[in-house]
Image: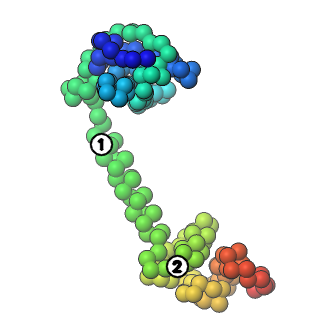
Amino acid sequence: MEGGGDEFAIGVLISVKTTLGEEFEGQIVSFDRPTNLLEGVGRAERGERRNVRVLKANYIREFSVVGRANDPLDPAGCVLDLSAIHAREEAALRQAEIDAERIGVGVTPEAQSIFDALSKTLPVQWDKTDIVVMKEVRVCNPYLPENVSGGTSAANERVKKVVKKPHTICCGVQSVGL
């Protein structure tokens, strides 16, 4: 369907049925004639959030104009909860820092996979190229079971089992009882 006229004017509320069988209502935010792209904003299923859809007008089977509302891009009409936005930003930055600390610098991919395996069940951190588990057990390069030291014997054995597993899988080393 080719868009034209005022039916795709900014601020118009429309009800749309697509060629794929979707039905929705929304307010037109923009329409680009050269690309025939329509951008609309509709209510999400819950809360104050909104769904933004970008749709090629060719995929609209039928539509009807429901009404006209204020300009959706008018800054005076936009309500942004800046404290919520800043809180989400801070949470994302904290998570990014946590994720970055989990990546070893100057270590082999094998060492990183051992770290990742240990981190699934135990608290771990990097100390340069050494893996420190539960702040007491240390796994040093070349990250073999015999390079596990410190901590209680039970903790030490648990870490050795996890360290041995990647070597068994990737290197074809036969599993031997510890």
Quarter of the image where one finds residue 175: bottom right
111 or 85: nearer the viewer: 111
Can residue 161 be seen from the camera position used here? no
- Residue identifier under label 1: 83
Q: CA distance from mark 2 to mark 1?
A: 41 Å
Horizontal and vertical percent position of residue 26: 40, 20
- Residue type, label 2: Thr
Count of numbered tags: 2
Looking at marks 2 and 1 on the same chain, the residue that comes earlier in the sequence is marked by 1
Q: Could you say which disc has been placed on residue 108 in the image?
A: 2
Q: Is 107 left, or right, of 82 in this rendering?
A: right
Helix, strand or loop at disc 2?
A: loop
88 or 36: nearer the viewer: 36
For the C terminus, the image quarter is: bottom right
Can residue 171 be seen from the camera position used here? yes
Which color scheme did the rendering employ for the protein?
A: rainbow
19 or 14: nearer the viewer: 19
Residue farthest to the left, as pictured: 76
